Image (tube, grey):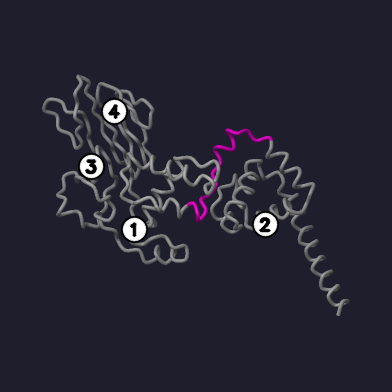
Amino acid sequence: MATSMNNQNQEQTDLINKNLETAVRNTAIQMGCWTAADDYVLITSILHLCDLERVHKEVKFSMPFSLENIQDRWQCLLYDVSISKMIVTKIQQLSMSQIENLHIPFNDEEEQLLASIPSYTIPTLLDNELDACLSKNSQKFWSNRTINELRECWLQMRQQGRLSDQQDAYNPQQTETIQEHATPRKLSQLLAPFEFELLSRNKEEFADKTDLPYALLHVNNRVYCMYSDQLNFGTSFLDRQYDISFDNSTTIHIQGMIIRKLGLFYIINNGDNAFRVNNALLNPNEASPLGTRAVINILEHTMVFQAIELP
């Protein structure tokens, strides 16, 4: 009996050694393909997600490594002293600025914490809510999480209906089913339940429509919906009319427009005075891409732009 057990243990040991030899050989072949940043992200993501398959699917390395590549390298990090030492030495040469720019996917616990923030949170207060959540649960978030990362993840979760107060709260086992059987969303479900105003449309008539706007603009606790390819805004001035007007107690007049072209958004300063877009100065006769989210400062007013991902 003891002899049989010893034979089984020896077979298992031989198999482990053989697998490690294969992993070492494959890792040696690919050694020049992995950067120090790749290895840092690999180690951090595995420890954070505890799932090699998720790391393969969600982590953006410098090149598309296969699941087998990731498994081999992780095995070498754990069991091959020489390779592990060499990789760790390379990682230690990374600067803090390089590490701060690396992205680690959110794990389930982090997403559950973000899901607790209500979907109707006013955009101008969202960063405060995210900061409070991060401060209160700092031990549960990855140490280098930023407010920008939290905001992007929360907005994506809200867009997908995965926040706790939404009808289809996030369930990891039902995500694929929800996406496959998704029904058209109504505009009233998309908008937060605070005062809003539709551009060139009537609230009661169009709130239940399923033709979503191209973008939302949050101004002074109002929500404006952009249905056309061009939206004009400016400070109140003489007889000029804008889609979005800002009260102005100064002699400075500001005007601009947001245009949509080939699915992309741009902001143009067609006035005589500068204003700020994401803290950068936009001078007269200048244009800038908006991306999916932007904060636009018009004198003392703040306008938050949010593109809508159409289904």
Give how far apart the Cα atoms at labels 1 and 2 are.
37 Å
Q: Which residue is mark 3?
A: 222
Element type where label 1 sits in the image: loop
Judge depth for marks 2 and 3 and give the one in front: 3
Give how far apart the Cα atoms at labels 4 and 2 are.
52 Å
The amino acid type found where label 4 is placed reads: Asn
The circle drawn on residue 19 is none
Q: Residue at x 61, y 57 (%)?
A: 52
Element type where label 3 sits in the image: strand
Mark 4 touches mark 2? (CB < 8 Å)? no
Q: Nearer the viewer, residue 56 or 131?
A: 131
Q: Position of residue 10 (x, y in %)?
A: 84, 69
Q: Residue at x 63, y 49 (%)?
A: 42
> Which quadrant holds the N terminus?
bottom right
The circle drawn on residue 71 is 2
Q: Position of residue 258 (x, y in %)?
A: 28, 36
Q: Nearer the viewer, residue 93 or 209?
A: 93
Q: Position of residue 280 (x, y in %)?
A: 38, 27
Q: Which residue is mark 4?
A: 269
